[in-house]
Image (cartoon, rainbow, N blue to C red):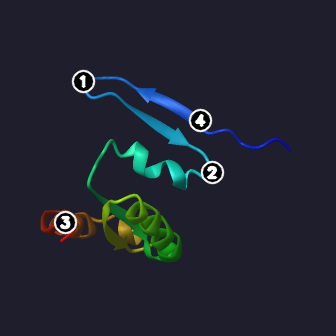
Amino acid sequence: MSPRVPVRIPVGGPAPYEVVVGQGLDGELAGLLGGAAQAALVHPVALAGRAAAVAETLRAAGLAVLPLPVPDGEHGKTAGVASGLWESLAEGVG
């Protein structure tokens, strides 16, 4: 089997960006954030361990990280959850 190569999809418009789809891309995360100083990491509760590893990768690259766990599955797709995320984002990384 050959190694999987990430797929890079350019998105145009007034603020163009690139979507990268693939596996093992943790090392590229900070660079994909366009020089941001902080990042919100929204993740389902079931992936808390994986999210912690991603957060550590981002912190090691100098970013402040705000982990934002949401309920798993359809329970996380509610107006209440979205409202809670907006409130958390307004409070910031701190």
Residue to which mark 1 is pinned: 14
- Check disc 2 and report the residue beneath it: 23
Toward which corner of the image does residue 10 lie, by quadrant? top left
Camera-nearest label, 2 or 3: 2
Q: Residue furthest right?
A: 1
CA distance separating discs 3 and 4: 33 Å
Residue holding disc 3: 83
Classify mark 3: helix, strand or loop. Answer: helix
User: 63 and 50: which one is in front?
Assistant: 63
> Amino acid under label 4?
Val
Observer-nearest of 29 and 18: 29
Q: Mark 2 and 4 residues: CB-CB less than 8 Å, in contact?
A: no
Q: Nearer the viewer, residue 62 or 45?
A: 62
* In the image: residue 43, left or right of residue 1: left
Residue at disc 2, secondary structure: loop
Which callout, 3 or 4, points to the residue nearer the camera?
4
Which residue is label 4 attached to?
7
Q: x and y percent of residue 79 in the render?
A: 24, 64
Q: Secondary structure at mark 1?
A: loop
Query: From what the image shows, is residue 19 above or below residue 28?
Result: above
What residue type is disc 1 on? Pro
Instruction: Calculate the distance from the C-alpha at mark 4 to the C-alpha at mark 1.
Output: 22 Å
- Residue 41 location, x and y as percent? 36, 63
